[in-house]
């Protein structure tokens, strides 16, 4: 599988990266917090599976992650900047008909893009529940605790596991703290306006961002699709990529 890497400049001058593979219908997939495109989508075969299914898989590295710029100055972390960066990527690539998906923070970014008028054909929100979109402060508080107390977490605790994952991806703690300041809640009444097919694909043991079933219920055309695993393990299993593929390829929803 060939993976191409490209770069573009964000509205505030930060250099952002994306990875790409496959030919066909554009599909933008956004990774989770502490992660990057390679870990979320390439390493465990999801990108290859989707490329083989006829998609042009476009996988940005969010600012402060992966190959993208990791500024430390607070000015580079205004509210909703992650959504703004993806709109800039869409414009840079000249896309006007595409599918859109994201895992965890990527799913939250997708929701913010929809709230701001993005109009993809079909959408995947994965590793995400209703609370994680409507009340972002709880999850932000968890990660702020992780990042401000590195090396002090009880072995085996959720914070310890998050720090362990951070080490595997070589994340920049200062830049990643900035990301938490960009979070914006998407209220239920806004979610109820998302009148397009949305697959809520979540590990059956994943409650990290609240209830995935509750999220599917408030979306006019939301559908809950369970896959094996919890928040950390579901993303490494083939079933996640298969569920994304199957939802996007359905003739009608």
Image (cartoon, grey):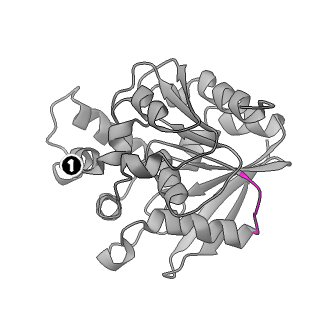
Camera-side residue of 47 and 191 = 191
**Residue depicted at x 16% and y 37%:** 153
Q: Is residue 185 visible?
A: yes
Q: Residue 215, how many percent across, how many down?
A: 43, 35
Image quarter of the C terminus: top right
Left or right of residue 147: residue 59? right
Q: Is residue 73 visible?
A: no
Left or right of residue 95: residue 127? left
Q: Which residue is mark 1?
A: 141
Q: Which secondary structure type mostly characterizes the magenta part of the structure?
A: loop
Q: Residue 137, how many percent across, how many down?
A: 24, 51
- The span shown in magenta is 94-98
Left or right of residue 85: residue 230? left
19 up-or-down from 253: above or below: below
Q: Residue 25, how many percent across, how many down?
A: 81, 48
**Residue depicted at x 67% and y 65%:** 90
Q: Residue 155, how many percent across, how many down?
A: 19, 28
Image quarter of the N terminus: top right
Secondary element type, mark 1 = helix
Left or right of residue 106: residue 5? right
Query: How many badges with numbers are in the image?
Result: 1
Disc 1 crowd, CA 10 A, few/some/many (<14, 14-19, 20+): few
91 up-or-down from 129: above or below: below
Is residue 243 magenta-colored? no
State the image quarter where residue 71 is shown: bottom left
Camera-side residue of 218 and 185 = 218
**Residue depicted at x 36% and y 68%:** 79
């Amino acid at each position: 599988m060939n993976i191409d890497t490209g770069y573009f400049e964000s509205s505030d001058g930060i250099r952002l990266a994306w990875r790409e593979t496959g030919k066909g219908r554009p599909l933008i997939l956004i990774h989770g917090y502490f992660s990057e495109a390679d870990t979320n989508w390439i390493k465990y075969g999801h990108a290859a599976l989707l490329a083989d299914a006829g998609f042009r898989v476009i996988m940005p590295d969010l600012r402060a992650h992966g190959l993208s710029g990791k500024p430390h100055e607070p000015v580079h972390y205004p509210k909703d900047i992650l959504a703004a960066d993806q709109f800039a990527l869409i414009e840079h690539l000249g896309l006007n008909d595409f599918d859109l998906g994201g895992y965890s923070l990527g799913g939250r970014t997708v929701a913010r893009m929809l709230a701001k008028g993005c109009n993809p054909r079909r959408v995947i929100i994965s590793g995400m529940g209703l609370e994680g979109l409507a009340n972002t402060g709880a999850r932000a508080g968890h990660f702020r605790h992780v990042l401000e107390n590195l090396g002090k977490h009880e072995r085996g605790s959720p914070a310890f596991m998050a720090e362990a994952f951070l080490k595997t991806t070589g994340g920049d703690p200062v830049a990643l703290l900035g990301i938490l300041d960009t979070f914006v809640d998407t209220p239920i009444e806004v979610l109820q306006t998302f009148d397009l097919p949305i697959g809520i694909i979540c590990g059956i043991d994943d409650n990290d961002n609240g209830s995935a079933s509750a999220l599917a219920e408030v979306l006019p055309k939301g559908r809950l699709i369970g896959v094996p695993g919890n928040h950390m393990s579901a993303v490494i299993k083939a079933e996640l990529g298969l569920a994304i593929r199957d939802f996007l390829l359905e003739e009608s929803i």
